[in-house]
Amino acid sequence: MPTDKNKITITNPTVFTTTADIKQWITAQAQALGFADCGFLSVHHPLFTKQIEQLQKWLDKGYEGQLQFMHNNHDLRAHPDQLVEGAKTIISVRMDYLTQAPTPRAVSDNDHPNKGIIARYARGRDYHKTMRSRLKQLALKIETMLPEWQHLDIGSEKEFVFRPFSDSAPIFERPIADAAGLGWTGKHTLLINKQAGSFFVLGELFLSLELPDDKPVKEHCGSCSACIDICPTQAIVAPHELNASACISYLTIEHDGVIDTKYRHAIGNRVFGCDDCQLICPWNRYANLTTVDDFAPRHGLDNSSLLELWQWQETDFMKNTQGSPLRRTGYVNFLRNIAIGLGNANASLEVVEQLKSKLTIHNDMLDEHIEWALAEQHNKLDSTN
Ligand code: B12
Ligand code: SF4
Ligand code: SF4
């Protein structure tokens, strides 16, 4: 029989005989889009009402500081199905963000007191946008497969509804990922994966397909308490209990205005966020590097001195933080954080001069932090003379 050399036969090698096949296919697509892993959970899972009780206890202790949004939309948190009408399943995804492997079980950031430390997740492009746009791509890929899945009674014949989220709505992201088997909740309250540590961010794709839940994994913290012991501000008050208002991540990113003097030495040289409880965690020796270019550090944010950052004018801040998580803190709070770092830096007349150069320019709040840093520098200079 003559063969038509130009004819290309496209066959789909995947046979979808069970919902497990569909989940496997979706997971492979998610991985191709740069997600490290994904898990599946019903929007009606019992965890949501249980989490509301825990959240209320947390709020009753006043741990939220200025995080007012934690008081809002508890109804939606308890009933995520109301967040996206017609949604049946949440696909929980995680994305690794490290671009360089840190020294295992050590807070090496402390070895460089004159450097300004930016948390590792925040050195490149804002992950919220990256996650949501890739989750949308995942949804569009799923949509093309719906006709092939109609025999499996998962609602693929109905109108397809989806919505991507990442830290963008009142959703219990970490508990969802925990219940969907992406890892366990460490004593520092972050999710850890046995093969990948905890340096990853989370996101969710809500969709109208009905897919079976994944199972949670076993926890592996055991008797370890390294994160609790290392936390510079003792913000982890008990296993799985974080006083956010004492956490350096909160203080440097979310807290507006004066930072209590009791935290300033502990903040050290951390300018935006804090990685200490993760750096010390033994499971992060397995942390994977990211495959996503967006996390590549911009403007030398993985290796900048405090003085270099201090010299950013407001126009530099606005230019250099376009599309970056750093924008969130605002210019004056950014300077406030660097002033604390300079107070904690090695004694130096140059630091003193640079600190003085920004006095009386912005506001009383910043001036108070500069005065504090100058006093710290003078104390150190006096004791070395
Ligand atoms: C508010 C918030 C913060 C606050 C408070 C953090 C906190 N742990 O609550 C601040 C600003 C301090 C913060 C800091 C950071 N954050 Co944050 N944050 C959030 C946010 C928006 C909400 C978290 C929340 O609901 N907190 C409220 C408390 C009540 O919830 P919870 O910690 O889950 O507490 C529960 C447990 O304690 C549980 N519980 C009680 N007893 C027990 C016992 C057991 C055995 C278990 C399992 C649970 C448990 O009940 C509590 C109530 O639900 C989420 C995004 C989201 N929408 O979920 C990101 C999120 C948690 N943050 C994230 C990140 C990356 C960080 C930082 C690492 C950033 C940095 N490098 O600076 C730090 C880490 C600090 C830390 N140790 O947690 C990631 C975490 C990824 C991961 N691997 O888990 C998230 C998921 C954002 C994202 N989309 O990726 N964050
Ligand atoms: S991020 Fe830093 S301050 Fe916050 S709990 Fe972890 S170690 Fe403590
Ligand atoms: S440092 Fe230890 S206790 Fe803390 S999250 Fe890691 S394994 Fe768990």
Image (cartoon, rainbow, N blue to C red):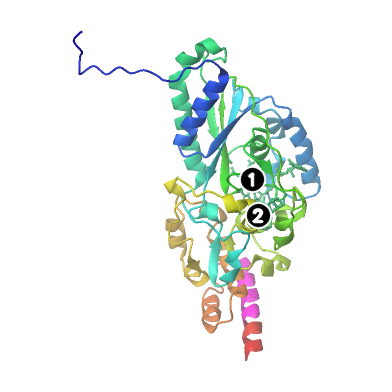
Looking at the rendered structure, which numbered label has been put on residue 192?
A: 1
Give the x, y percent position of residue 89: 60, 25
The residue positioned farthest toward the top in the image shown: 1
Q: Amino acid at mark 2?
A: Cys
- Along the line of sight, the residue nearer the viewer: 91 or 363: 91
Q: CA distance from mark 2 to mark 1?
A: 10 Å
**Within the magenta stretch, is there residue 202?**
no
Asked if the residue at label 1 sits under 8 Å from ligand 3, the reply is yes
2 and 1 marks in contact (CB < 8 Å): yes
The C terminus lies in quadrant: bottom right
**Within the magenta stretch, is there residue 366?**
yes
Residue under the image location 63 percent in, 56 percent down:
249
Give the x, y percent position of residue 103: 57, 61
Span shown in magenta? 362-377
Looking at the rendered structure, which numbered label has been put on residue 99?
A: none
Q: Amino acid at mark 1?
A: Ile
Residue under the image location 51 percent in, 45 percent down:
127
Q: Quadrant of residue 347?
A: bottom right
Asked if the residue at label 2 sits under 8 Å from ligand 3, the reply is yes
Give the x, y percent position of residue 305: 50, 70
Q: Which residue is mark 2?
A: 281
Query: Which circle's residue, 2 or 1, is located before the other in the chain?
Result: 1
Q: Is residue 362 above or below residue 102?
A: below
Q: Is residue 235 visible?
A: no
Q: Is residue 378 above or below residue 150?
A: below
The N terminus lies in quadrant: top left
